[in-house]
Image: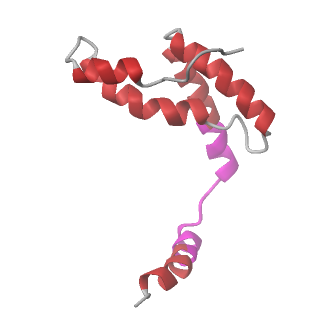
Amino acid sequence: KYKGPISINGSHQEGFANKSSNESYALTAMFVAIPLLLQKPSKNSKTKEHVAHLARRLILWKEGRFEELLKEGRAIQKGLEKLRGNVNTEHTRKVFSRLMLPVLCVD
């Protein structure tokens, strides 16, 4: 179980601000961390699973095991692509237009 403060950005912010040797990737790491750590494990996963995965991912992050996190993220994204299948762009365009038109036409 993960115990401790949830500060995923602290050292990376310092690395960027202080022009340290890790400056080149510090900002990228900050932007990648949150979506990577909070990614749902599956389409139908429950809150209890989310908490368990987040705790495990925070431990991996703190230990610097970024490759494992990235590998898991890629696997989840690949699964999502399979679920989506072929996207009908015409249908997507119509739905987007229908939903956005009232917003854009407000006086």
Give the number of marks. Answer: 0
Percent from the top left, x then y, of residue 59? 60, 14
Quarter the N terminus occupies: top right
Q: Please provide the residue range marked out in magenta.
A: 77-95
Quarter the C terminus occupies: bottom left
Percent from the top left, x then y, of residue 4? 60, 15
Q: Residue at x 56, y 20 (%)?
A: 5
* Quarter holding residue 20: top left
Q: Is residue 75 above or below residue 21?
A: below
Q: Residue at x 50, y 77 (%)?
A: 100
Task: Name the residue furthest bottom.
Answer: 107
Q: Is residue 1 magenta?
A: no
Task: Name the residue furthest front.
Answer: 5
Percent from the top left, x then y, of residue 57? 61, 21
Taking depth in this image into account, of 22 and 3 the one nearest to the observer is 3
Q: Main secondary structure of the magenta part?
A: helix
Taking depth in this image into account, of 13 and 45 the one nearest to the observer is 13
* Quarter holding residue 25: top left
Q: Is residue 16 left or right of residue 7?
A: left
Task: Name the residue furthest left.
Answer: 19
Percent from the top left, x then y, of residue 14? 30, 19
Taking depth in this image into account, of 78 and 52 the one nearest to the observer is 52
Q: Is residue 97 left or right of residue 12?
A: right
Q: Residue at x 44, y 87 (%)?
A: 106
Q: Is residue 80 magenta?
A: yes
Q: State the colouring used for the structure image.
A: secondary structure
Q: Is residue 97 above or below residue 42?
A: below
Taking depth in this image into account, of 101 and 16 the one nearest to the observer is 16
Q: Is residue 28 above or below residue 61?
A: below
